[in-house]
Image (cartoon, grey):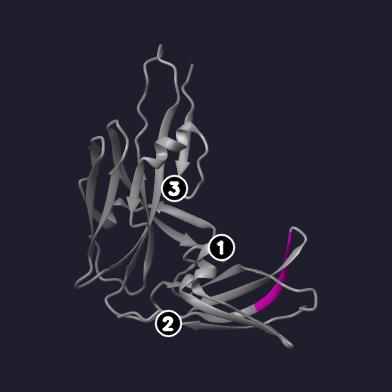
Amino acid sequence: MRTPVIIVFASLVFLTAAAQRAAALGVTPLVLELRSGGEGRTAQIVVNNDSATDIPVELSIERVELDENGGQHSTPAKVDFVVVPPMRLIPPHGKQVFKIQWAGAPLLKSQSYSFLVLQPHVKLPDAQSGVQLDFQFQVLVYVAPPSGTRTLDVLSSSVTAVNGKRYASLSVGNSGNVHAFLGDATITLSSGSWKRTLLPMDIQKSIGVGTVQPDKKRRFTLPLELPSEVSSLNASISYSGAFH
């Protein structure tokens, strides 16, 4: 009988024995920014094994394009980077540093990547029962041009109903050539005498980094339930995403 596979993502909360094993594998950082020219073309991903068993780990790389609603469209992109080592067996209570380096030419616009830190599937003998665990952690890697700008502009704002509650919905655009993060912005919403401000920490708790790729727009539902008297919204963004 075929052994079932459980895929465990780093963003989930684990409540089972499988979760306890997954928690023994730690990955840092989860977001990296690189340059495609000059300094800053290299970075490191550190994987810690806090368990009492050996864990094989490898890196898989995909280029990611985001649509307006945040949907991901991925394509393999192994040739865009040099990864050393590409795979390693990490001993109990040990760690491995994976060095990554941009291998392409200098870019004109930022590109977004997903580095998947995987525990490869190991086929068990037919007579052996049990659950095969495949751990998968995602590291977001952004590769920017040697120089450029990133912006966040409000394109529209509206009131959106979600499960019977009313929230602020915001469409934002990035007219620069470098990726921007809504999670680094401060957003002010107003309607008549009503006014509220969302700080970066408020936004990050709900939507994470909130990537807006160059020359693209994204629509976000903000973590703020609106009072009944608010029927329309004005919105402004204060964004200090300077790129040096």
Callout 2: 10 Å neighbours few (<14), some, many (20+)?
few
Closer to the chain start, of discs 2 and 3, is 3
The residue that appears at 37% across and 31% down in the rendered structure is 121
Image marks 2 and 1: residues in contact by CB distance under 8 Å: no
The residue that appears at 49% across and 16% down in the rendered structure is 1
Amino acid type, mark 3: Ala
Based on the picture, tell me whether residue 160 belongs to the magenta stretch: yes
**Disc 2 element:** loop
- Circle 3 residue: 10
Q: Which residues are magenta?
A: 157-162
In the picture shown, does residue 243 fall above or below 40? below
Outermost residue to the top? 127
Callout 3: 10 Å neighbours few (<14), some, many (20+)?
some
- Circle 2 residue: 240
Q: Nearer the viewer, residue 186 or 143?
A: 186
| 109 horizontally vs 203: left or right | left
Callout 1: 10 Å neighbours few (<14), some, many (20+)?
some
